[in-house]
Image (cartoon, helix red, strand yellow):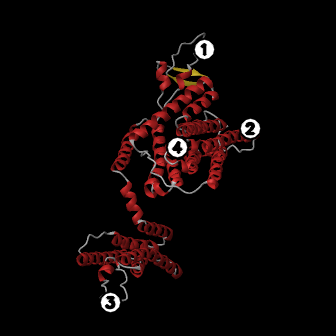
């Protein structure tokens, strides 16, 4: 423990400890005041006799302490640490813990109620945070104190969130985590040589100085045999499952937000949260809802647009994790596409008759094994298919694969393009075109679903909105290609 600090430094540490204790104490004090106000009987009528003075001991006893108590506990931890003796710190902690336990026992005896440990644990934590301040780790202590106060203040929301979580959701997360922990280490670290197995031989042939395993070596006129196009095909199973974990985790954030915030906060909140998980689910749900509430057609279209605006932004965010250079280059077409959708939503917002409420959008837990395995299979097929079409048809084959895969999901194409660019098997420009074409294909499919499944009152605004996004996507793609070929875009990676 640091005992060489100057007096100014020591006073600063004590001040930070006091602030942390006051912050947590204010939250506890405010909660106690709210509870006291809720229990207080209404004011009697002037003609009624004055009621006897209410006893406040029990209500006060339910709270371990207010602002002053938590400030003193934090300051005690800081001073005990600055003393330089670990035994003084341990003795002080035991003394505070003993007082906390005694206070809890006394409260339980007086109230005969079912009490929680939140305030008591908060008091012990504040003591330890004060100890961190006394040791000079002010940033860590301040951050932990803020997090503690935030968690304490979110009691009601956390309880509502827990009540919305189904047992099946918890089981899905546990099963997915267990499967990942058990299966992931067992997956081969190196890509599987699928092409070599198809070639049906274990011989090695040298072509242009490169050794290719699994190709039949039958020299003709002294020259090595040219290997078949499929000889170099591989499948990286471990990478596939890592991407499943990544995409499922990002989608799970939206799923949790939906549970925490509550989907019945309004059309736009519901759409924005749902767009993180599945913009297709939001689009189809809102389109079908338009038959029941035609008066909300404008707002339903706004919600559909918001979910689809989030989709290209989400793609860029995912690629920043796996291939940041590609994400940077995709910012132009994806930003223009999202901007067009946002502008169309603003036009509809100015025309809206009023805000509306609706039922929850049914979103599947992305950690359900069926959903995760389905995505993994789709990504594996796209990743493996990209090697085949590139070998047979070149970049044109990759573009066709992107359009076809985008009909169902954009993420597999985005991750495949990131893999191709990162490994140097294709250029940055090809990766940008692949992802943009997948987004265009996916947007067109969802637009068709909305127009066909929605009410007639929804179709006009849907055609306008999705038409604007598609035109913007094509325009953004053209601008990205122009900037690349003109050299206006700095190549941060790839040819």
In the image, which is nearer the foreground, mark 2 or mark 1?
2
Residue hosting label 1:
223
Dividing the image into 4 quarters, which one contains the N terminus? bottom left
In contact (CB < 8 Å): disc 1 and disc 3: no
Dividing the image into 4 quarters, which one contains the C terminus? top right
In contact (CB < 8 Å): disc 3 and disc 4: no
Nearer-the-camera pick, 211 or 268: 268
Q: Is residue 455 above or below residue 32?
A: above
Nearer-the-camera pick, 302 or 489: 302
Q: Which mark is residue 269?
A: none
SS state under label 2: helix
Residue hosting label 4:
287
Expressed as whole percent of the image width and height from the top left, the position of residue 173 reads 38, 48
SS state under label 4: helix
Residue hosting label 3:
50
Pointer 4 local density, CA inside 10 Å: few below 14, some 14–19, many at least 20? many
Q: Which mark is residue 485?
A: 2
SS state under label 1: loop
Give the mark nearer the N terminus: 4 vs 1: 1
In the image, which is nearer the foreground, mark 2 or mark 4?
4
Residue found farthest to the top: 221
In the image, which is nearer the foreground, mark 3 or mark 2?
3
What's the CA distance linking mark 3 and mark 2?
A: 87 Å
Q: Is residue 88 above or below residue 146?
A: below
């Amino acid at each position: 423990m640091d005992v060489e600090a100057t007096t100014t430094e020591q006073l600063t540490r004590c001040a930070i400890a006091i602030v942390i204790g006051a912050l947590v104490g204010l939250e506890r004090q405010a909660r106690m005041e709210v509870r006291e106000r809720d229990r207080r009987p209404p004011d009697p009528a002037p003609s009624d006799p004055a009621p006897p003075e209410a006893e406040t001991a029990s209500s006060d006893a339910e709270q371990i302490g207010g602002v002053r108590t938590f400030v003193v506990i934090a300051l005690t931890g800081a001073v005990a640490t600055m003393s330089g003796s670990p035994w003084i710190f341990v003795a002080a902690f035991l003394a505070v813990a003993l007082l906390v336990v005694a206070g809890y026992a006394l409260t339980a005896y007086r109230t005969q109620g079912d009490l929680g440990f939140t305030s008591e644990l908060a008091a012990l934590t504040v003591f330890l945070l004060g100890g961190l301040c006394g040791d000079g780790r002010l940033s860590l202590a301040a951050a932990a104190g803020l997090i503690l106060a935030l968690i304490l203040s979110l009691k009601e929301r956390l309880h509502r969130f827990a009540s919305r979580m189904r047992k099946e959701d918890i089981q899905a997360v546990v099963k997915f985590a267990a499967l990942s922990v058990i299966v992931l280490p067992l997956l081969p670290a190196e890509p599987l040589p699928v092409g070599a197995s198809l070639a049906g031989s274990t011989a090695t042939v040298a072509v242009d100085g490169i050794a290719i395993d699994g190709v039949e070596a039958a020299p003709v006129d002294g020259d090595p045999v040219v290997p078949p196009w499929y000889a170099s095909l591989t499948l990286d199973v471990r990478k596939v499952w890592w991407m499943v974990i990544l995409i499922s985790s990002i989608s799970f954030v939206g799923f949790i937000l939906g549970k925490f915030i509550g989907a019945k906060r309004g059309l736009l909140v519901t759409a924005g949260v749902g767009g993180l998980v599945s913009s297709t689910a939001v689009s189809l749900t809102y389109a079908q809802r338009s038959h029941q509430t035609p008066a909300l057609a404008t707002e339903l279209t706004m919600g559909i647009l918001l979910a689809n605006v989030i989709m290209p932004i989400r793609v860029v965010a995912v690629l920043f994790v796996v291939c940041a250079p590609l994400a940077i280059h995709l910012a132009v077409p994806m930003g223009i596409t999202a901007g067009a959708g946002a502008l169309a939503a603003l036009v509809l917002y100015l025309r809206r008759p009023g805000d509306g409420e609706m039922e929850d959008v049914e979103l599947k837990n992305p950690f359900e094994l069926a959903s995760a395995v389905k995505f993994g299979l789709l990504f594996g097929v796209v990743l493996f298919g990209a090697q085949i079409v590139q070998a047979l048809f070149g970049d044109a084959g990759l573009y066709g694969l992107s359009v076809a895969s985008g009909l169902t999901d954009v993420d597999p194409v985005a991750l495949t393009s990131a893999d191709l660019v990162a490994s140097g098997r294709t250029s940055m420009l090809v990766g940008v075109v692949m992802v943009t074409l997948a987004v265009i294909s996916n947007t067109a499919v969802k637009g068709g679903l909305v127009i066909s499944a929605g009410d007639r009152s929804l179709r006009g605004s849907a055609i306008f909105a999705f038409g604007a996004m598609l035109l913007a996507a094509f325009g953004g793609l053209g601008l990205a290609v122009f900037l690349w070929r003109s050299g206006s875009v700095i190549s941060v990676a790839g040819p």
